[in-house]
Image (cartoon, grey):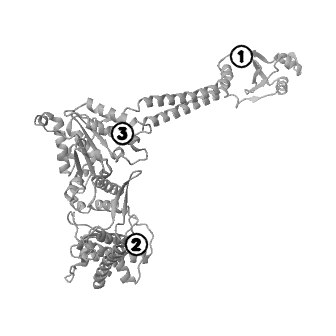
């Protein structure tokens, strides 16, 4: 909660408190108004003559009447006449009036003055209170205006969860680069004596969730020097020059505490390539960037202040930021491989009661492409699933279900589908799984399910057994055949296709076009790429594609794309026709169990005649 929000809540509290106080005062002043009877002069005279009145108290023109039955009443007398004269005029004889105790009280006291002052002062108090709030806000705005040039720089202090490099799994090369930074800050003399210059800036680049901010916190935990951190978006304000002033203030603060580290998170908020806006070089964001460039380039050799920045968009950063003398080192954080994923899972499993039979390696196998943040979320989802079942330990199945939940979304077991739709889905997924298992070199099937998750009516999970950074044409064609497996299974079984294959066909077409236009894997088109991407700087960086080939070539590309699709379709058709009984067996088992794990699936297709096919 920021300061402005706290101020608003505080003002609302005092306004409500004031209204409650006024209400209480009015209730005290007029508490008798609702419990006493208001009499006219004629009614009062009647009661006096009938002997019902015990006492009358005169307060100015107000009469407070005590009746003999214990009740109370009020009345008003004439303004310019005394009470006895008024009652005599209405027929009350002196002998009858002598039976009534008369008492005259002075019109002073708290209630009298409050009854006079509150109706007069209350509107003035309300108006004054409103003006006080307005002037207070204006005063705060003036103070804020004077503090615009101050950066909202935070010092990494004694956090409960202190992070060191031991808490960061994987990223060996990145940690090595940053370890040198920490060593320089601890032992600068060793580097300076030999003439070495430590990098003035370190840029951490990587996909979201790969651990950029976590590594920066680890540097803070390891270095033991003041660690200042700020988000780049906090530099920029709507007022011109504020961002540059805050940048100067941030760097001056870091220099005053040298040796120190200044961490700027999401630096692409101000570090975008200049010329991207309509304001030219006078744009506020660009002025802030210019000031950062000047401050970094103005460091002295032994300033002992290192700037660490993080971004997941290095492609849009200004080239001046990346030149030597500014961000000398650019550390790339890759997605973790299988060993790193297992180590990350072990770190996030600390404090969670795992079953003794859990194998985190199997979970790591099922999570290629997961970032560190994804794996942390996976472990948390597994714990939630276990708690939902009122169990005290997390089982292997919880982790597997968490993987699928992160990938596809939660299960929708209650989704109402007809028996026919269930049968179509079973044959569709059985087709995917059987084609995958039949192709030589294809990734193994880990799970087949016809339970809806997210937008998917069913799914077949196939995952590589080892990390792969390169892929061959035969592997791509195998992937195409797998994508066509569901479509082909529906056609071969029911004689027609459903809309369930639409996403498969879309993905297959996209992959086939990439084989022709990007990867040069078409025999007819040769080792060429088609289409050229351009980066345009206008209102931000945009990527557009330019058609750099003729209409004739475009026609040939379309033919080659279709040829890849046809080849994959024929391969899937050949597999499913030759193994139709096996397809039916898998589909019927899916309709019964709804889910087949890896061991169950391969037990179904285990046969001496089952041979892998090359396509």
Residue 547 is labelled as: none
Q: Is residue 478 left or right of residue 129?
A: left
Q: Are marks 2 and 1 in contact (CB under 8 Å)?
A: no
Q: Which residue is mark 2?
A: 502
Q: In the image, is residue 190 above or below residue 514?
A: above
> To which quarter of the image does residue 587 belong?
bottom left
Q: Secondary structure at mark 1?
A: loop
In the picture of the structure, the residue carrying the numbered disc 3 is 288
Label 3 vs label 1: CA separation?
A: 71 Å
Examine the image and state in which quarter residue 187 appears: top left
Residue 541 in the figure: left or right of residue 344: right
Instruction: Name the front one of labels 2 and 1.
Output: 2
Which type of secondary structure does the marked residue at label 3 adopt?
Answer: helix
Rendered view: 407 above or below 264: below
Say which label, 2 or 3, has the lower sequence index: 3
Query: In the rendered image of this protein, does residue 417 appear above or below residue 46?
Result: below
- Apparent side of residue 247 relative to residue 598 in the rendered image (left or right): right
Residue 389 in view of the camera: no
**Residue 166 at x, y = what percent?**
19, 46
Graded by Cα atoms within 10 Å as few (under 14), some (14 to 19) or many (20 or more), the crowding at tag 3 reads many
Q: Residues within 10 Å of mark 1 (few under 14, many from 20)?
A: some
Q: Residue at x 19, y 47 (%)?
A: 175
Of the pair 258 and 37, the residue shown nearer to us: 258
Q: Residue at x 36, y 36 (%)?
A: 244
Residue at the spot of label 1: 107
Q: Work out how far the residue at label 2 is from the one at label 1, CA to CA, in angstroms.
A: 91 Å
Camera-nearest label, 3 or 1: 3
- Relative depth, front residue between 396 and 537: 537
């Amino acid at each position: 909660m920021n300061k402005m929000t706290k101020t608003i809540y505080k003002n609302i509290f005092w306004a409500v408190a004031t209204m409650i106080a006024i209400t209480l005062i009015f209730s005290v002043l007029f508490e008798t108004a609702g419990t006493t009877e208001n009499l006219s002069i004629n009614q009062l005279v009647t009661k006096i003559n009938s002997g019902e009145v015990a006492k009358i108290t005169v307060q100015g023109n107000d009469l407070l009447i005590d009746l003999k039955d214990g009740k109370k009443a009020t009345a008003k007398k004439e303004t310019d006449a005394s009470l006895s004269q008024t009652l005599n005029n209405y027929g009350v004889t002196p002998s009858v009036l002598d039976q009534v105790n008369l008492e005259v009280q002075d019109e002073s006291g708290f209630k009298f003055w409050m009854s006079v002052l509150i109706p007069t002062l209350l509107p003035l108090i309300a108006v004054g209170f409103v003006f006080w709030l307005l002037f207070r806000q204006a005063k705060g705005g003036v103070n804020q205006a004077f503090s615009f040039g101050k950066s909202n720089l935070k010092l990494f202090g004694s956090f409960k969860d202190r992070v060191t490099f031991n808490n960061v799994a994987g990223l060996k090369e990145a940690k090595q680069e940053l370890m040198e930074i920490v060593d320089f800050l601890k032992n600068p003399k060793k580097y300076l004596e030999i003439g070495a210059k430590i990098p003035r800036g370190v840029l951490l680049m990587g996909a979201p969730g790969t651990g950029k901010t976590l590594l920066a916190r680890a540097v803070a935990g390891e270095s033991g020097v003041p660690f200042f951190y700020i988000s780049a978006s906090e530099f920029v304000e709507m007022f011109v020059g504020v961002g540059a002033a805050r940048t100067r203030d941030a760097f001056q603060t870091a220099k005053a505490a040298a040796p120190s580290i200044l961490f700027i998170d999401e630096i692409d908020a101000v570090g975008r390539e200049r010329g991207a806006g309509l304001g030219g070089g006078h744009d506020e964001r660009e002025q802030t960037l210019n000031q950062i460039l000047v401050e970094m380039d103005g460091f002295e050799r032994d300033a002992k202040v290192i700037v660490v920045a993080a971004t997941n968009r290095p492609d849009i950063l200004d080239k001046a930021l990346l030149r030597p003398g500014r961000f000398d080192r650019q550390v790339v954080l890759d997605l973790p491989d299988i060993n790193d994923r297992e180590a990350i899972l072990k770190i996030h499993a600390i404090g969670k009661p795992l079953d003794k039979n859990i194998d985190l390696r199997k979970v790591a196998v099922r999570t290629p492409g997961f970032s560190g943040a994804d794996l942390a979320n996976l472990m948390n989802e597994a714990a939630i699933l276990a708690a939902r079942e009122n169990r005290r330990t997390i089982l292997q199945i919880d982790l597997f279900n968490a993987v699928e939940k992160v990938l596809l979304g939660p299960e929708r077991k209650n989704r109402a589908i007809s028996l026919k739709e269930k049968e179509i889905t079973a044959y569709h997924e059985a087709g995917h799984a059987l084609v995958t298992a039949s192709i030589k070199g294809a990734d193994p099937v880990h799970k087949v399910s016809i339970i809806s998750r997210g937008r998917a009516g069913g799914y077949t999970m196939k995952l590589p057994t080892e990390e792969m950074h390169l892929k061959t044409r035969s592997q791509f064609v195998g992937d195409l055949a797998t994508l066509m497996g569901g479509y082909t299974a529906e056609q071969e079984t029911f004689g027609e296709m459903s809309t369930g294959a639409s996403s498969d066909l879309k993905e297959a077409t996209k992959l086939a076009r990439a084989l022709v236009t990007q990867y040069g894997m078409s025999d007819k088109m040769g080792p060429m790429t088609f289409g050229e991407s351009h980066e345009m700087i206008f209102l931000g960086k945009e990527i557009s594609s330019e058609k750099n080939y003729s209409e004739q070539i475009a026609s040939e590309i379309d033919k080659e794309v279709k040829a890849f699709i046809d080849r994959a379709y024929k391969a899937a058709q050949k597999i499913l026709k030759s193994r139709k009984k096996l397809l039916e067996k898998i589909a019927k088992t899916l309709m019964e169990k709804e889910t087949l794990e890896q061991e169950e699936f391969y037990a179904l297709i285990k046969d001496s005649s089952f041979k892998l096919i090359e396509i």
